[in-house]
Amino acid sequence: MRLPKIDRILSADAELQPLVSKARDLRALGELVDGFLPPDLARQARVANFRDGELVLLAANASAAAKLRLLAGPLTDYLSERRWQVNSVSLRVQPNASRGAAAAVQKSVHLSTPTIESLRTLHGRIGASPAREALGRLIERASGQNQGGRNRSG
């Protein structure tokens, strides 16, 4: 199976290996949790973290959290059967955590001139990489917005 482009980029950097490994673990746990929960409840919950045997789930609302709390024991058993050492399930209510909700609308952000200059300095210091290219595009967009803002206001 071919890795998506971002996975290949991240996997190539040895310093990012712990992060990549953690993301893969969370993705695998998320898939197991989704498979265990009823579909309606699965859409209202997501895996936030797994550390020291504690699985942290985010619930879209208090009602979903209450249902997840009732299923915490059986979920722990289910994950243990699949060789995950889950000792406890922690729940946090985070409105809008639902994956079934519509995607967030892209927001525009106005960066100050000093912020753009700081980003330019950072851009000049980091080596050639996809991250540097993305930062360059961000600076270009932000600079264009600042220019456009000045033209409109005066």
Image (spheres, rainbow, N blue to C red):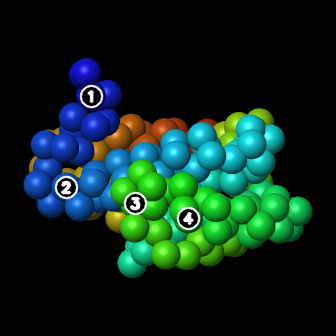
Q: Secondary structure at mark 1?
A: loop
Residue picked out by circle 4:
76
Pointer 1 or 2: first along the chain: 1
Res. 146 in view: no
Pointer 3 or 4: first along the chain: 4
Say which of 141 and 64 sits in front: 64
**Mark toward the viewer: 3 or 2:** 3
Residue picked out by circle 3:
84
Question: x, y (%) of residue 106?
Answer: 67, 40
Say which of 111 and 44 sits in front: 44
Residue drawn at the location 39% of the way across and 38% of the way down: 137
Q: Dot 1 surroundings within 10 Å: few (below 14), some, or many (20 or more)?
A: few
Pointer 4 or 2: first along the chain: 2
Q: CA distance from mark 4 to mark 1?
A: 30 Å
Residue 17, numbered circle: 2
Q: Secondary structure at mark 4?
A: helix
- What amino acid type is highlighted by mark number 1? Leu
Q: Image check: 44 left or right of 11? A: right
Res. 44 in view: yes
Say which of 21 and 104 sits in front: 21
Q: CA distance from mark 4 to mark 2?
A: 27 Å
